[in-house]
Image (cartoon, coloured by chain):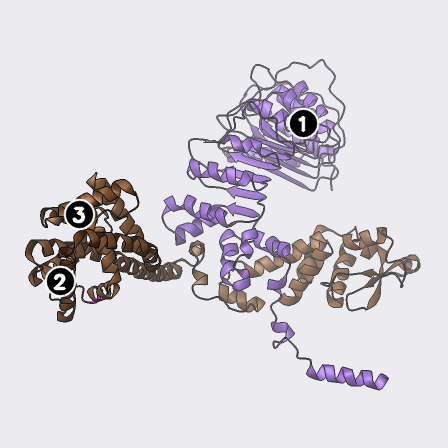
Chain colours: A brown, B purple
Amino acid sequence: MSEPDVIKPEMMKSYIWLQTADGSIQQVEQEVAIFCPFICHEIHAGMGSSKTYPISFPARVNPVTLSLILDYCRFHQVPGRSNKERKSFDEKFIRMDTNRLCELTSAADSLQLKPLVDLTSRALARMIEGKTPEEIRETFHIPDDLTEEEKLEPLKNITDDPRIRLLNRLYARKRKELKEKEKLKNIEVETEHVDDRSVDELLSFINGENGDSKEVKTAKNKKKNRRRKNQQKNVSPVCTNSNTSSSLNNGAKESNGISSVSRDDRVKGGHCLPNISELLKLQDSEDDRFALDDDFDDCDIGDGIDPEIKEQIDREVEDFARRLNSDWPERVQELLSLGQERRPSLYSINGNGCSTKLSHASGLEKHEK
Amino acid sequence: MINIFLLLRVIMEVTYKAPKLIAPEEEDFITTMPDDVVTNILDRLPIQDAVGTSILARNWRFKWNMLSQLVFDDDFFHYLSYKAGDTNNYGCIISRLLFHLNGAITRFVLRRKLDDENVSHWILFLSRKGIKDLTLAHDGITPFKLPTRFFSCLEFKHLKLYNCCLSPPPTFLGFPNLLSLQLFRENSELGEFIIRCPLLEILILYDSDKVGKVKLDEIAQLKNLKILSFSLSHLNTTMTVSSYNIFELLDSLPKLQVLHLNFKDYKLTKGGAKKRFPAAFPSLKALKLYRIDLCNGENLSCAFELIKSCPNLQTLEILAIQQEADPIPIPEVEYNITGLKSVELINLKGSENEVHLIKYLFACSPLLKMIVIRPRYSLAPGEQLMFARKLLMLRRASA
């Protein structure tokens, strides 16, 4: 390429020393090298003039890439070329393996050679544009390591619509199922409160008709119905509680005393358990309350109740009745003291239950007032 | 000693396990490129392809979040209509996309009429992302009213606002970095807006029915202007325009390289004929006179003067109209050498004046490489033939 006239001036050209990361050193004509801004800066900083102080390149620039870059610089630094010539050179220049092209882009970027970065980036963009993901992966040897779910983030609606819509639906269904499971768990927690109510109903029947088993049954059925209906209402338990308390009042003779006692208690110590039903609830918790709950859960929809459970309930009812009819004042005191002690433990056993019980209490208070 | 070293080296080489099990040709280079390089590449892709790279591999999931150039043009909406269907969703889709973007956004192009509310919100979002180049174009009937937030984006460099209502708040002090402004169908105090953008290099006011008004001396204040395109209808009609005014304008824009002047059927007035025209405009390289009636004496002499006083003019385009029927005396013009390389004359009638102009051009343009003369569409074949004959008879200075 060099004409005979140019040989002499070429001899006068100054050379720049360059060193790549692997240690190899080479010479390049200065006018070629200064086309690259990075080299230009280094020269101004005083480097590259001799073999002992070569310009060292960043790690991304290996010898192959450097020679490509220098070829590019060598062509384009000549001012007399037409746009057409430059374009055709560029087109031929970027015809290389994709990986080499990537390396070249990174190297040009680290050397701040913007025209080359633009050229190579354009070429890489052309390789990506309009292709399916599989094709792109193949071109650039990208491993396919995404899970199906990750591919389905909602924003992907822009790319691969029908398939993603379907998979999104499946995913949403899964989420729904999970939520339902959680709901069931909550229901289980709720049913404990429902069971509280059921025991109160039992009590009402104790006072009314001596705890007939049938009543118990109906009460239980009622409870079940109520459970299905009023799962999240705290108002109804309040009502039933007040009913039971009133029925209690109506029933036993001593109930008046009880209620008076309870009222006094309420007046004296705000946080004491004022109500019989509350006391009895505490009693319940001592007994196999939770086992009872589970049993109820298991046999939820069936019409008949397990005979064993029925017996258990009968026994409990009788127990309550006995307690009610025994020495009231002392018994009440005892229960009160027990209740106060057991309250913290009650909290620890079942936080959810506690809060509702508290709300029951407060609800009752409101109602009574 | 050396032996021990050699031994150690051998041991190391034997025990050292090459981490790559794939051949170098099969390696994934593109994923390991620096982020700004990858962003540069993704910016050049259509948006749907850029977002689509997120399902290539685990490392690619969020590379598109650094996109800095967003172009929502016809291709994109065509793609959306194909995939998403419901046009009401488009705003939602774009909003969701914007929500994911992490980096600065320097360019935003929207070429579709979408819900004004949405666009206002996007402008608010972009104002926080360092937007520099904004194009809002739509062909709706009602112009889009730019939100106040728009006027506080001081980093704007390029603005293309088609069919937008430009009404800056009183506190607006201008866009200090604005380099190019292209407006179509704006209706506001344009002049005030312009003079507050001192660095403006490109000003293009497209002709339309509802235009804002600007004064010539307001344009004259933009000393950095390189490309100017406007219509005489943009000027305040209180002032009638003469050749002298145009030359005055050119004189005050020392860097102007391209001038497109739409006469829009106007006739230049005779005012200022006695004043001396300014000497020369060496920087002007391209001149386009649109809808100029060369049968009008003033217009014709203006055209001549312009060509004469721009020694470095390389391209000349004239789209002529013919309104006046009566012939006028052909003005005397000195013959100067022009540097014209390419001339395009469209919609000529073949009148004396036009031929005179062409004669002048032929005679004075030794560098002329290409001349395109398109006669008026409605010209009868006979007249066309006469025109052609006249042209062929003219002396040509170029090879």
Please name which of the two marks, 3 or 2, marks the residue nearer to the observer: 3
- Label 2, label 1: how far apart the Cα atoms are: 102 Å
Between B266 and B215, the one nearer to me in the picture: B215
For disc 3, the chain is A
Which numbered marker is on residue B222?
1
User: Is the magenta region chiefly helix, strand or loop?
Assistant: loop
Q: Could you confirm whether marks 1 and 3 are on the same chain?
A: no
Which amino acid type is marked by label 2? Glu
- Label 1, label 3: how far apart the Cα atoms are: 97 Å
Question: Which type of secondary structure does the marked residue at label 2 adopt?
Answer: helix
Which amino acid type is marked by label 3? Ile
Residue B338, by quadrant, is top right
Left or right of B279 in this view: B258: left
Left or right of B173 in this view: A349: left
Residue drawn at the location 58% of the way across and 46% of the way down: B104
Which amino acid type is marked by label 1? Leu
Q: Which residues are magenta?
A: A298-303
For label 3, the residue is: A258
Q: Could you confirm whether marks 3 and 2 are on the same chain?
A: yes
Q: Is residue B71 shown to the viewer in this render?
A: yes
Inspect the magenta stretch and tell me whether residue A252 lies in it. Answer: no
For label 2, the residue is: A318
Mark 1, other Cα within 10 Å: few <14 / some 14–19 / many ≥20: many
